[in-house]
Amino acid sequence: MYQNKKFLSFLVVVIILLSSILTSASATVIKTKCSKESYSLSIQDIKNNDANWTIMFYLCCENHISYEAEKCVSKLSKIGSSEDLHIVVLKDGDEDGDSVLCYIEKNNPINLNQFYEWPNEVDMSNPNTLFSFIKLVKENYPAKNYAFCLFTDMGSGWQGIYHDTRNPNSGIPLMSIPTFADVFKRTTRNESDKIDVIVLNTCLMNMIEVAYELSPYIDYMVSTEEHMLEELDKGPKYIVQYKQVIQNLKNNTNMTPEEFSISFVENFNPCDFPMWALYAYMIFFKKGQYLPILEKISDFLTKILNSLPNPDFHLVKVKTSLSAIKLDKIVELEKSIDNLASILILNKHDQNVNNAILEARENVREYGKFFPKNRKNSIYYLNFPVEKLGFDSYVDLYNLVYLINRSVYKKSVKNASCQVMLKLKDAVISNGVMPDDPSNGLSIYFPENKELYNRYLWDEKITYKYENLSFSQNTLWDEFLKTYHEV
């Protein structure tokens, strides 16, 4: 009997010990890799901790900016998350099996692939990848405010976003803007749970067409009408200062979404960036590390081209910009543009109105000149990027209507253009530009001639047409373009 009691006591002790071990295991401590180092993390310490902010970084870098992915994670890890700030990253570079989902602790980027059974290789240009990432983050790292920050190359305005070279489709396939917006529609439960801020760190995305598509699902948008520079172009001082902005947010997590959006612009240094002869060779092939002899040859050729009397054959000079847009003001702006388009169509036979449009189009601020008008000329253009061959179908909206207003006589056109300018000022809450740059925060599609209408930047055939955008379907702007160009 005594032996039985002794055995039962031993059995109880064993059960208690096992229970303790299993309970401890349920906290799920994982050891894995991120940025080539091993770390441990108690997921239970992080998951379901309501913070003031959750920042999502989507580093679609399986392209020529692959080096930026590791650099971004390294910079963010110097900041690290806190109780009131979650920083979660999905990064993908140009190697096989290098897609990593990370939670960023200070000096400790933690690989979550194993814990969430996330694949080691994904197509970042696939809308399901984007949807799955946002859904996972919102479910597991809840917060009062959410920001989504994108890094990728080949930003193409209304023509598309997200360039992943692993995408099996031919040419340079990009996610369409309606598809991009639909992901946010699904992740925000059809407008009921909006993303507070979206930061598009890629070229040409601050277009009225893009803003309108995203406006039902996102409150603030930060991006550029122009091209974004890489560090290789002019150095770290002239890129988006996300490290400083996130550090400021960590120091003050009570920052409002509007303040957070504006802080990107306030910390941005706009600059001019003259493209030079042999640009493509030195940047894409030599990664900025070119020989002095090549630099001298490039300088010599650049001087020759820029001394020609015809400015069409001068080399392109890019003036960078960054702007914050209040997206709940976009619908009123869209209505004013629709009204202006209607009046311009009505007066299509008025010579003064047509002359005002023609003069405005000839002198308006244009964007997109890192890219050629015709992809067949890419190799020539990227080494000799002259104005005449540069893509120029995106123009500053405010500058366009201001120039029309200045030279037109009809009061109806003047009044309609004034309304566009007023509504645009309401929508653009911060605008970072050089003093002599007439960029005002949002651009619009206005190709130079009918041959350029619906011409795709990256292939012979456009993947979806301008008419398929919500902005085109809900306004007469596409009808105006087709009437004006006789498309």
Image (tube, rainbow, N blue to C red):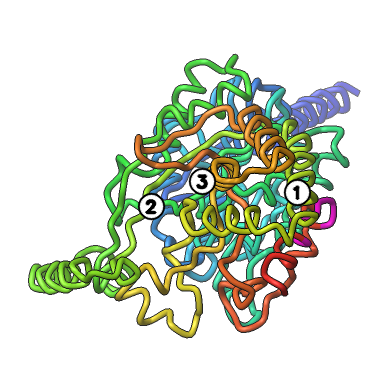
Q: Which residue is mark 2?
A: 229
The secondary structure type at the circle numbered 2 is loop
Amino acid type of the residue that numbered disc 2 sits on in the rendered structure: Leu
Rendered location of residue 412, percent (x, y): 74, 40
Residue at point 65%, 30% (across, down) = 422
- Using a 10 Å C-alpha cutoff, classify the residue at mark 2 as few (fewer than 14 neighbours), some (14 to 19) or many (20 or more): many
Toward the right, the furthest residue is 1
Residue drawn at point x = 37 percent, y = 76 percent: 381
Q: Earlier in the sequence, mark 1 or mark 3?
A: 1
**Numbered tag placed on residue 213 in the rendering:** 1
Query: Where residue 89 sits in the image (x, y, percent)?
Result: 57, 45
Whether residue 292 is visible here, answered yes or no, is: yes
Q: How far across and down, in percent of the image, does residue 198 sit?
A: 63, 39
Amino acid found under the numbered disc labelled 3: Thr
Label 3 or label 2, whichever lies nearer to me, is 3
On the image, which quarter does residue 147 sit in? top right
Residue 435: quarter of image: top left
Q: Earlier in the sequence, mark 1 or mark 2?
A: 1
CA distance separating discs 1 and 2? 25 Å
Residue at (36, 54) in percent of width and height: 318
